[in-house]
Amino acid sequence: AHCFVLSCAFMSALPPTLASPPSSIVDEIRALADTTAGRICTDADATALASTDFGGNVSVVGARPAAVFYPSCPADIAALLRASSASASPFPVSARGCGHSTRGQATAPGGVVVDMASLGRVADSSGRLAVSVDGRYIDAGGEQLWVDVLHATLVHGLTPRSWTDYLHLTVGGTLSNAGISGQAFRHGPQISNVHELDVVTGTGEMVTCSKEKHADLFDAALGGLGQFGIITRARIPLTLAPARVRWVRLLYANAAALTGDQERLISEHGALAGLMDYVEGSVLTDYQSLFASRPSLSSFFPDANDARVAALANEAGGVLYCLEGAAYYGGAGDTSAAHVDKALEVMLRELRYARGYTFVQDVSYVEFLDRVHGAELKLRAAGIWDVPHPWLILFLPRSRILDFAAGVFHGVLRHDRAMHGTVLVYPMNRGKWDGGMSAVFPGEEEVFYTVGILRSAVADGDLRHMEEQNSEITRFCENAGIPCTQYLPYYATQAEWAARHFGPGRWDRFVQRKRKYDPKAILSRGQRIFSYPS
Ligand code: FAD
């Protein structure tokens, strides 16, 4: 009774009645459904689901949408946006990938959430993952999961180069942020690895854009937090796929040694340049609970090592660091196991980790890339996946990472109660990022770090405690003059977005692009950047 069918064929020309819309959003949506393609649901189950996300923090997620829209093709999305745009009181519309945001970014309070997965569920959705072997690219629907992109390309011995740690995220969702992982130091974030996009703008226009064609929209949409259009297709370049991975973890007793080594590994010069295909790192402020809560980690450090690791942790004053590296070999690529082993030998000789604390695994390329999914399944089984996730992810310049470590890893987070999560720290090369795109990153130094404090609020009181600590970390950075940029940012007011996230030049450009592509601020209101009327 609460679902309306819209059929794609009729969507290109919306009836003139929509130009003088009924007073309430629900009536407007009904009018759209009565006349035209797709399916709209206003029932409580659908709207409740569309107002949740991975963050699970009800206080920031906000109100429910009035409806959820299930498009059958990109033209359905264009029609919905044109209807809102033509309305006297335009209703908010947000694309929802998997809802893996943590602060309600994919919600559309009082408006319409577009269930992107629906694009891939239509009878003939095979074209939504189309590999061109000769062109060395894949055309992937914005709703597609990166794990499916991986499998579709591997069939042809090919693979994208830049990833996220977790692959059950959508192409459109990560490209609206940046998409980072341990390959970004060499290939840049995922947004630096796109040839072309199909975007439906806030005015309902369907545009194909690239660096050559409609470059301004292309740059705006990449890292654009869903503000300029809904990405319905991305053309992603591919390279020859390796078959296997030597996956290394090394323990460190101090931050200076870890970061020094990471920087040598990501440098394009020096003895260690090019040895690793992936470089990340983590901080173990409470290594015991980490072992308990991160099955993927505990399997890396077999139980037999517990006592040794505990001894090192004591020696290090309770905070351990871990460098994580990976070297690919085999498959369609031309790197042999012997070559990789030689590289590892050099690396293990040169790096300054705590001697004897070397842990190496050999896994398939798929196992390596899809590693977080294994942890997800275990956390789900333990009932601690669907809990609040008050994540804080920061970018900061290289020159301040040790100050940050002293104040946060050895300060705010030290002697914390059970950690339930992980703290990532790894560097990236600024030169691999494109300042013309919407994503914000530190621009001053050649190298910047990402620090991801990725925690799960498992016990009563954890959420509040972790949110307070996040605020304490932000205050610490302000007081210490450490310039931090949030990744997957969240600010409650436009003034904060302007001043604290973008800064004057970038903010002006962001606003100009918004006026051009979504003048009625219809898109992704859950980000809390723009409202209408402003
Ligand atoms: P959603 O959360 O559904 O949407 C995110 C935003 O993008 C919303 O504003 C939404 O309206 C907009 N949006 C969604 N689809 C589109 C589209 N097609 N076009 C335009 N706008 C759109 N990120 C990393 O970079 N690296 C990581 O290693 C990483 N690991 C993660 C691990 C886990 C377990 C989780 C839960 C998240 C991780 N993320 C990581 C964060 C992830 O990139 C973001 O959550 C991102 O938003 C993608 O999630 P999603 O596809 O569910 O998008």
Image (tube, rainbow, N blue to C red):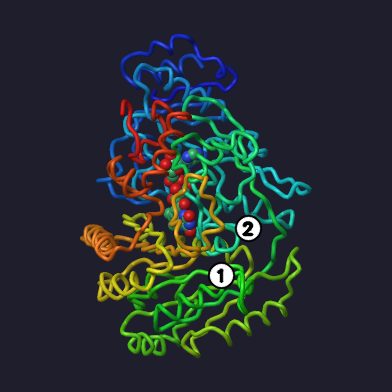
Q: Quadrant of the C terminus?
A: top left
Residue 33 image position (x, y, % from top left):
46, 19
Looking at the picture, does residue 167 appear above or below residue 334?
above
Tell me the CA gap for discs 1 and 2.
15 Å
Looking at the picture, does residue 482 appear above or below residue 336?
above
Q: Residue under label 1, please give it.
A: 266
Does the image show residue 460? no
For the point 32% across and 72% down, which residue is it? Answer: 409
Report the number of numbered marks.
Answer: 2
Residue 445 image position (x, y, % from top left):
46, 62
Q: Amino acid at mark 2?
A: Arg
Q: Specify whether 279 is left or right of 477.
A: right
Residue 266 image position (x, y, % from top left):
56, 70
Q: Which residue is more in the foreground, 502 or 528?
A: 502
For the point 46% across and 87% down, which residue is it? Answer: 354
Q: Specify whether 205 is left or right of 514.
A: right
Residue 161's label in the rendered image is 2
Label 1: how many Cα within 10 Å (few below 14, some 14–19, many 20+): many
Q: Which residue is more in the foreground, 5 or 27?
A: 27
Residue 223 image position (x, y, % from top left):
48, 46
Q: Amino acid at mark 1?
A: Ile
Q: Earlier in the sequence, mark 1 or mark 2?
A: 2
